[in-house]
Amino acid sequence: MHITFVKKIKANGEACRKCADVEQRLRDSGYWNCIDTVLIADQRIADSAGVHLADALGVDRAPFFVVEDDAGIISVHTIYLKFVDDVLQHLHRELNAYETACA
């Protein structure tokens, strides 16, 4: 599984407040290490990696998460709490079961 976190820099150069809040929540909850890639959607730079990805996926809000599972299936998550419930908690349970089984 590969998880990409896309956060935004607004046209005035300021960091997106919601993006910063979500990043802090990831760090505080211990989920930050589950994020494999962080991309910036810089509204001042039309060809920034985050802008390209958002356009390709039809996403018009930030922050968002892109999850590619082991089968190559991609899912997009724009709601942080739903992303935690659907992806991170599931991943955390799998890792704990793996560590327990291998101990």
Image (cartoon, helix red, strand yellow):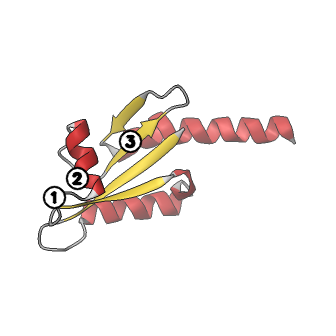
Marker count (numbered): 3
Q: Position of residue 10 (x, y in %)?
A: 17, 66
Task: Compare residues 58 and 101 and report the one nearer the observer.
Answer: 58
Query: Image check: 13 left or right of 90?
Result: left
Type of amino acid at the residue the image marks with label 3 = Val
What type is the residue that disc 1 sits on? Ala
Q: Residues within 10 Å of mark 1 (few under 14, many from 20)?
A: few
Residue drawn at x 87%, y 42% is: 103
Q: From this view, report whether residue 63 is shown above or below residue 97.
A: below
Q: Earlier in the sequence, mark 2 or mark 1?
A: 1
Residue 62 in view: no
- Badge 1 element: loop
Residue indicated by mark 2? 51
Residue that extends furthest to the bottom in the rendered view of this protein: 13
Rendering quarter of residue 93:
top right
Query: Badge 1 is on which residue?
Result: 46
- Which badge, 1 or 3, is on the more N-terminal residue? 1
Label 3 belongs to which residue? Answer: 66
Q: Are marks 2 and 1 in contact (CB under 8 Å)?
A: yes
**Residue found 16% across the figure and 62% down from its top:** 43
Farthest front residue in view: 47
